[in-house]
Image: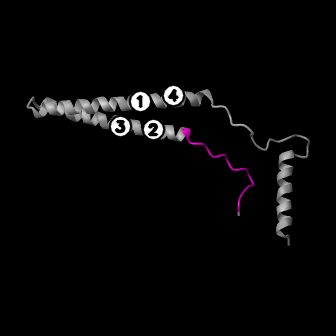
Amino acid sequence: MFTFRERRATRVLSVVRGVTDDGGEQVAAGHRRADEPSPGRTRALLGLSVGIVLSVLAWLLLVRAAIDFGQAARDGRGALGWLLTVVAGAGAALCLMLGLVLVARLHALLRPSRPAPHPGSHRR
């Protein structure tokens, strides 16, 4: 039966063999520098940011329009004012939902990704 030190030494040797590879070919153990952001990721960040700003501006515009239409409808300008109030309110709700979805996607894009586990590195 192996002692703890013998088991640890065996594990360390297997890791060293896996990194240096006895065939003389070097195998990368990991990156030393962070990867450069890809142009596609930068473009996605910019697109999501612009989409968030536009959806928030549209939400603001539709809320103001709904308030104005509601005041006009309350003053007795007919059923068209109430219809426009409902349509503007529903549009504002959709713009707000779109903005929240875009914020969630931006957050997911900015969140650091977890590296894939190495094969054979299972903890017991």
* First in sequence: mark 3 vs mark 4: 4
Q: CA distance from mark 3 to mark 4?
A: 19 Å
- The amino acid pointed to by label 4 is Leu
Q: Amino acid at mark 3?
A: Leu
How far apart are the alpha carbons under marks 4 and 1?
Answer: 11 Å
Amino acid type of the residue tagged 1 in the rendering: Val
How many labels, in total? 4
Task: Check disc 4 and report its element: helix, strand or loop.
Answer: helix
Nearer the N terminus, badge 2 or badge 3?
A: 3
Tell me which corner region of the image, top left, top right, bottom left or bottom right, holds residue 6. Answer: bottom right
Q: Tag on residue 103?
A: 2
Residue at 69% from the left image edge and 37% from the top image edge: 34
Marker disc for residue 105: none
Kindly identify the residue that appears in the image at 29 percent across and 33 percent down: 91
Identify the residue at image location x=8%, y=31%. 76
* Inter-mark Cα distance, 3 to 1: 11 Å
Binning the other alpha carbons within 10 Å of mark 4 as few (below 14), some (14 to 19) or many (20 upward) gives: few
Q: Which residues are magenta?
A: 110-123
Residue 46 numbered mark, or none: 4
Q: Position of residue 115 (x, y in %)?
A: 66, 46
**Residue under pointer 3:** 96
Sooner in the amino-acid sequence: mark 3 or mark 1: 1
Classified by dominant secondary structure, the portion drawn in magenta counts as: loop
Residue at disc 2, secondary structure: helix
Q: Is residue 48 left or right of residue 36?
A: left
Circle 1 — which element?
Answer: helix
